[in-house]
Image (cartoon, rainbow, N blue to C red):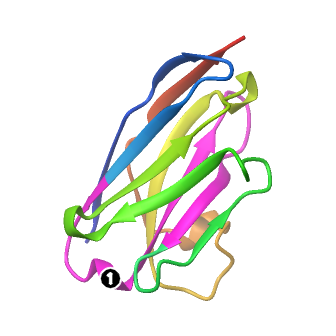
Amino acid sequence: QVALVESGGGLVQAGGSLRLSCTASGRGLGSYDLAWFRQAPGKEREFVAMLRWIDGNKSHADSVKGRFTMSGDGSKQTVFLQMNSLKPEDTAVYYCAARVRSLASVSLRRSYAYWGQGTQVTVSS
């Protein structure tokens, strides 16, 4: 079992920055992929970024490349999402997710068995 707790959301003006954190608890986390998804009102939950603990491999959605960066601190079992140059369309609830390391597409929602409670990010224009 893995428990995920997100923090760091808030209200920011367009062009600003925020850093989200997700702390994971459980055993064998080295065998997991950690990811960020987001869900805007009335829209499907979409993939944002993924980090593979075992080798540090990362993947970011095209919509956030060059603006968002996912990183991790293994000693704290925490992953981060640094979000720069935020746009109003980035407004969403951001969720941390985890799955046992998998060959499935990193953006496949159903491949992630564990989810955090979500943290709201609101970007004003």
User: In this image, 15 relative to 100: left or right?
Assistant: right
Q: Which residue is mark 1?
A: 30
Can you give x and y, in whole percent of width and height, for residue 113 in the image?
A: 44, 68
In front of the other: 9 or 86: 86
Q: Is residue 64 above or below residue 16?
A: below
SS at mark 1 in the image: helix
Neighbor class of circle 1 (other Cα within 10 Å; few <14, some 14-19, many 20+) is some
Between 75 and 24, the one nearer to me in the picture: 75
Residue at image location 25% in from the left, 83% down from the top:
28
Position of 30 relative to 21 (above/below)? below
Q: Residue at x 43, y 67 (%)?
A: 98
**Residue in view at x 47 percent, y 84 percent:** 101
Counting from the top left corner in percent of width and height, residue 120 is at 48, 28
**Along the viewing direction, whichever of 15 and 47 lies nearer the viewer:** 15
| In front of the other: 110 or 28 | 28
Q: Look at the image and tell me in which quarter the C terminus lies.
A: top right
Say above or below: 97 vs 22: below
Q: Outermost residue, top direction?
A: 125
Above or below 104: residue 13: above
The segment highlighted magenta reads: 23-51
Residue 37 painted magenta: yes
At horizontal 35% and vertical 51% (from top left) the residue drawn is 22
Q: Quadrant of residue 74?
A: bottom left
User: Residue 6, position in %: x, y?
Assistant: 35, 43
Residue at the right extreme? Answer: 62
Residue 108 counted in the magenta span: no
Q: Amino acid at mark 1?
A: Gly
> Could you say where residue 67 lies in the image, as x and y percent from the top left?
68, 44
- Which quadrant of the figure contains the N terminus? bottom left
